[in-house]
Amino acid sequence: MKRILAVATGLVTASMMIASASAQEVNLTLHHFLGPKAPAQTQMLEPWAKSVEEASGGRIKVEIFPAMSLGGKPPELYRQVRDGVVDIVWTVLGYTPGTFPRSEVFELPTVHQGSAKQTTIAFTEAFDMVAEDFKDVKPILLHTHGGQAFHMVNKPVRKPEDLAGLKIRTPSRTGGWTIEAYGAEPVGMPVPEVPEALSKGVLDGTMVPFEIFPALKLQELTQYSTEGAGGTRFGTSTFMIAMNKDRYDSLPDDLKKVIDDHSMANIAATYGAVWDGIENGGKDLRKSRGELIELTAEETRAFDARGQAVVDRWIKEAAELGLDGAAMVENARALVAKAPAR
């Protein structure tokens, strides 16, 4: 009888171990470059992670590591996820110049019109056009923010000539071209370095969306902000949430489906709208301290005329890579125009 009980107990224990193993959590690390209180974490990454965890019945656990807390610098995030150093990253595509040449079309001035939701939906719908950029990772979300506005330490900007000779921070090479087209000097740097650069006079201003104001305290470091007529912007930045391909492939099919259900077209409108919404808080901070300048339609056209030169430059470079840049710009503009804004 003792032997029978021992065998039965062993079988129960083994069964429990098998059941536990089958329900074992998959722990995923998510690394990014902003602080834990930044809207990118609190309003996008945390809700996304929570939804994934709930949809998996608790079998997936996503642990978020903000502010490069796993090591490295922001430009290294793409390589970290590609090489499997971390499982998932959120990063700016422009931090690794030359890696995402097709996706740059959505950064261009006169393509992005000022709505993150609109351009994020368009970016997602155009995935076949840009897919080669992401062949080494599993894209979860391709998106933009609300777009670049000018935030100046002590000089208001109402026409391109107001920027002549000034040092302006850019997030990407297309942003640098845009700044050059306006007659200013582009200074490339990741956004966490901007506050110190502004305070020390390294920069006269920066191109970022309003949503970053609380994190960087730009209302304390700049006096003037400028956007185009009707809230249009001077180009934008492209971002991705991406997963290591091998890590994704290692998941059982039902957990792959959870990730897929929380990826790309399934979440583009939701998080595009989030990025539009969080612009408002930054704008309120600007209005509470300093001046928000909205250009007239005529003033905006002066910037757009120079912005078209940036588009033409991009088309020429795309041709050198064997890409039909003109067709890509036309397609991107058409997709942005038909997507719902805000």
Image (tube, grey):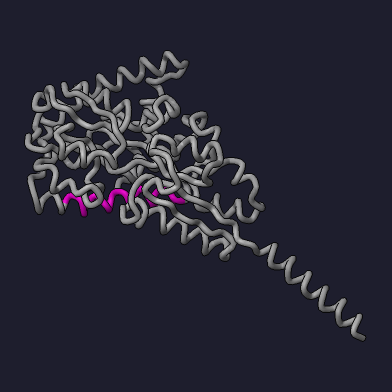
Does 280 appear in magenta? Answer: yes
- In the figure, is residue 142 to the left or right of 216? right
Q: Residue at x 9, y 24 (%)?
A: 161
Task: Please provide percent x and percent y for residue 86.
Answer: 52, 45
Residue 14 sits in quarter: bottom right
Question: Viewer-proximal residue, 53 or 29?
Answer: 29
Q: Residue furthest bottom?
A: 1
Task: Please provide percent x and percent y for residue 220.
Answer: 13, 48
Q: Residue at x 53, y 42 (%)?
A: 85
Q: Residue at x 86, y 79 (%)?
A: 6
244 w.r.t. 7: above or below = above
- In the figure, is residue 106 to the left or right of 222? right
Does 252 appear in magenta? Answer: no
- In the figure, is residue 94 to the left or right of 213? right
Residue 203 sits in quarter: top left
Q: Does residue 43 show up?
A: no
Task: Please provide percent x and percent y for residue 265.
Answer: 47, 46
Question: Viewer-proximal residue, 254 or 188?
Answer: 188
Question: Viewer-proximal residue, 342 or 75?
Answer: 75
Quadrant that contains the N terminus: bottom right
- In the figure, is residue 324 to the left or right of 295? right
Task: Please provide percent x and percent y for residue 239.
Answer: 39, 39
Residue 124 sits in quarter: top left
Question: Viewer-proximal residue, 22 or 323?
Answer: 22
- In magenta, the rendered stretch is 267-283
Q: Does residue 179 show up?
A: yes
